[in-house]
Each structure stands twice: as structure tokens, then as C-alpha cells.
Image: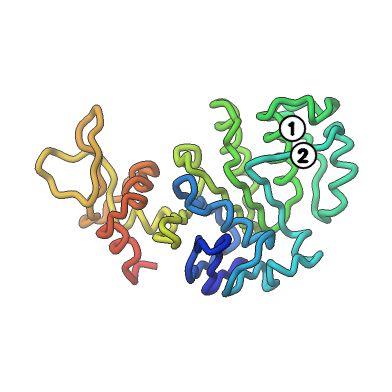
Amino acid sequence: MIEISHLTFGYGKAKLFEDLNISLKPGHIYGLLGKNGAGKSTLLKNIAGLVFPWSGTCTVNGIDADKRLPSFLQELFFVPEEIYLPAVTTTQFVKNTAHFYPKFDNSQFTKMLTEFDVPADKLLTKLSFGQQKKMIISFGLSTNTSLLIMDEPTNGLDIPSKSQFRKIIASALTDNRCIIISTHQVRDLDNLIDAVLVLHERRIVVAKSMDEIAERVHFGIIPSGADYIYAEDSMNGLNAITLNTIGSYSKVDMELLFNALTGDNKTLIEILNKPGHE
């Protein structure tokens, strides 16, 4: 699906990534995590062919992303963090745009709009930012492209809408589709993604499935004095990441994992990237 090889990119003289190597497969929802300013949006733009690497390559379905060929574009939909919609109704937007995507499903789109409670007969420019975001997310899902990229899609959504978002995204995944969602609000991807990419200090420090992470480390409250890889104080005690030595699986604590990895916890990075158990 997506093959990034030795990709280096930056703006001006400032290097943002260096020698990135990533392979992403269909049938997965990837969470691209990183602090504000880490370069998540720029990496997504490289994948979408909106910016060009200094060196290295990025291909999607075997096609160079930076060539932006029609066969590439009809299998890609990109939901940016900031959206600017024309002064047309949702119905008119579909009429003007859907024909660029051969697998667009209008009944699927209408159903999603109903679930999100977005009116179809109101000018898009008159909708709230949250409603605009829900409209474009619904449209992107209904294109049924093999690659769907969303940059900070939950920004502007209230709590009930975030819950709806997780439900709708999960229902839209197929074996032939790859979904990439970037965010710095890691809790919004809880129980949704099945693999995580953490971008930090110009590189992907971890690219693993949630199952692989749970196989190698354990998340939970530990007694005082117990060994741990990383820990934070909580109301219930010490919330920690520990080595999984007994083969018992725990739910991955996304926020704890994120804080540890972006805090340069080298022990955790080494454990998660150790060869084997693939």
C-alpha cells in the first residue's frame, strides 16, 4: 500500500525528517502520533504528494506520490486539519465532486450525515466548524478510496461527535483500505486504531501494532517499589509501563505510551523495536 524509503524532507534549511522508512498495509487504521510541531501534517502531505521530498521516495499502490497521477488521486482522500468549503449545499458539493471518485457511495454518505446530524440542504459556509468537519469526514469515508488520510479530524468535534467518529471510522474499514489518522490528542484514538506510528525528533521512534505493544509491555497500576520502564502518578497509585514477563495482555494506555515515547524513554523504544515477535 504505502512504502516510504529513505525519505528526507524539510522547509528552507530546517530538516524535518531524516531517512524515514515506513511500510503501511491495507486493512489497518494507523494512528500517527506526535507533539505539536513534530511534522505529522507534513508527513501526511508527503504521502499525499502535496510536498516533495528532498531525497528518498514515497509510493502508494506502487505509484510515486509526488507525480499526483489521476490513478493515484482517485484512490486517495485527504481530510486536512483546516478546511475551506465553498458556498454550496452538501447536495451540490456531492454533485460537483463525487464523480472524481469512482467508488463513491451516495447512500453511505447520506447515512453518515444522518448519524452526524448534519443538514444536507444548508450552505456549507453556514454550518459550524464542527458540522463542516463532520461533512467532509463523511464524504471522505464515502469515497471508498483505498487510502484515507485524516489530519487532526477530531479538532472541533464535541464529545458525543468524537464517539460517533470512532464508531463510523471503525465501520468503514475494509481489508482493502488503509486509514491514517494523525493527532496529538491521543485519547481520541482510544479503542479505534490497531497500529501506532510515533513521530518524534525527526524520526518514527515506534511503528508497531497494538497487539505487538501489548505483547512486549504491560500497562497498569503497580505497587510502590516495583520495577517499571515508565510511570506517572495517578489518583489510584503509580500508573506504569512494565516489561511483560508473564505473557498477560493489558489494554494499551495510549496517553501513557505517548508520554513515554515523546519523553525519549530509550528503554521503552529499545524494547518495542527489538527484532522478533513480529
Amino acid under disc 1: Leu
Q: 163 above or below 100?
A: above
> Which class describes the residues within 10 Å of circle 2: few (<14), some (14-19), or many (20+)?
many
Amino acid under disc 2: Phe
Q: 249 above or below 115?
A: below
Horizontal side, residue 84 vs residue 149: left or right:
right
Which residue is the extreme one toward the left? 225
Q: How far separated are the C-alphas under marks 1 and 2?
A: 6 Å
What residue lies at 57% left-to-right and 64% top-to-bottom? 25
Q: Which of 268 and 222 is in front in this view?
A: 268
Horizontal side, residue 267 vs residue 123: left or right:
left
Quarter of the rendering occupied by the C terminus: bottom left
What residue lies at 79% left-to-right and 25% top-to-bottom? 126
Observer able to see residue 244: yes
Q: Nearer the viewer, residue 26 or 136?
A: 136
Quarter of the view holding residue 222: top left
What residue lies at 68% left-to-right and 67% top-to-bottom? 65
Q: What percent of the width, then of the height, locates residue 46?
A: 62, 61
- Which residue matches tag 2? 109
Q: What percent of the width, then of the height, locates residue 141?
A: 70, 46
